Image (cartoon, grey):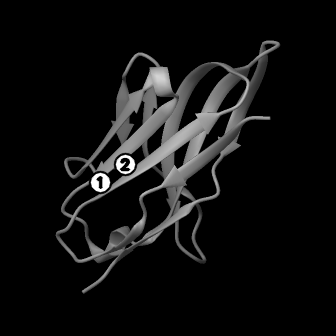
């Protein structure tokens, strides 16, 4: 069984910072891409940032220059450093992974349980 566990969400004032973490555990052979998505009630889940195993990144236009995604391949962990937070960043943030499990079983769309980020004064 493979799972993703997020941490680091919470309440922060506008202009503040938060760091999210997501650790993958279980019978993992290799993780291709890890990413962060977010969702507000009534809206579709949207990509925030993603990073490949070689370190290539891409970001949503709305967070470019404020958020930084990184990963520690040895720990199967991805991070999202969020700076200059705005009220419109308020959402549930989900971790996502495209990985290969033991037995060479590919799992393309593994999701974490989500962590709430609220930006409010």
Mark-to-mark CA distance, 2 and 1: 6 Å
Q: Quadrant of the C terminus?
A: bottom left
Q: Which residue is mark 1?
A: 63
**Left/right of residue 52 with respect to residue 27 in the rendered view:** left
The reply to whether the C-beta atoms of the residues labelled 2 and 1 are less than 8 Å apart is yes
* 9 is higher (above) or lower (below) than 19: below
Give SS at disc 1: loop
Outermost residue on the bottom side: it is 121
From the viewer's side, name the closer residue of 64 and 55. 55
Disc 1 crowd rating (10 Å Cα; few below 14, some 14-19, many 20+) is some
Q: Position of residue 114 (x, y in %)?
A: 58, 60
Give SS at disc 2: loop
Q: Position of residue 48 (x, y in %)?
A: 42, 50
**Residue located 19% across and 47% down the image:** 65
**Left/right of residue 16 with respect to residue 98 in the rendered view:** left
Residue 49's label in the rendered image is none
* 52 is higher (above) or lower (below) than 15: above
Q: Position of residue 81 (x, y in %)?
A: 29, 49
Residue 60's label in the rendered image is 2
**Residue located 21% across and 75% down the image:** 14
* 55 is higher (above) or lower (below) than 96: above
Res 1 quadrant in image: top right
């Amino acid at each position: 069984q493979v799972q993703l566990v997020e941490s680091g969400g919470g309440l922060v004032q506008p202009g503040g910072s938060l760091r999210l973490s997501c650790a993958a555990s279980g019978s993992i052979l290799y993780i291709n891409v890890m990413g962060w998505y977010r969702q507000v009630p009534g809206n579709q889940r949207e990509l925030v940032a993603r990073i490949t195993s070689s370190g290539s990144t891409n970001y949503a236009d709305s967070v470019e220059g404020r958020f930084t995604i990184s990963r520690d391949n040895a720990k199967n962990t991805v991070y999202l450093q969020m700076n200059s937070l705005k009220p419109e960043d308020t959402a549930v943030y989900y971790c996502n992974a495209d990985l290969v499990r033991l037995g060479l079983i590919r799992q393309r769309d593994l999701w974490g349980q989500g962590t709430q980020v609220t930006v409010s004064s």
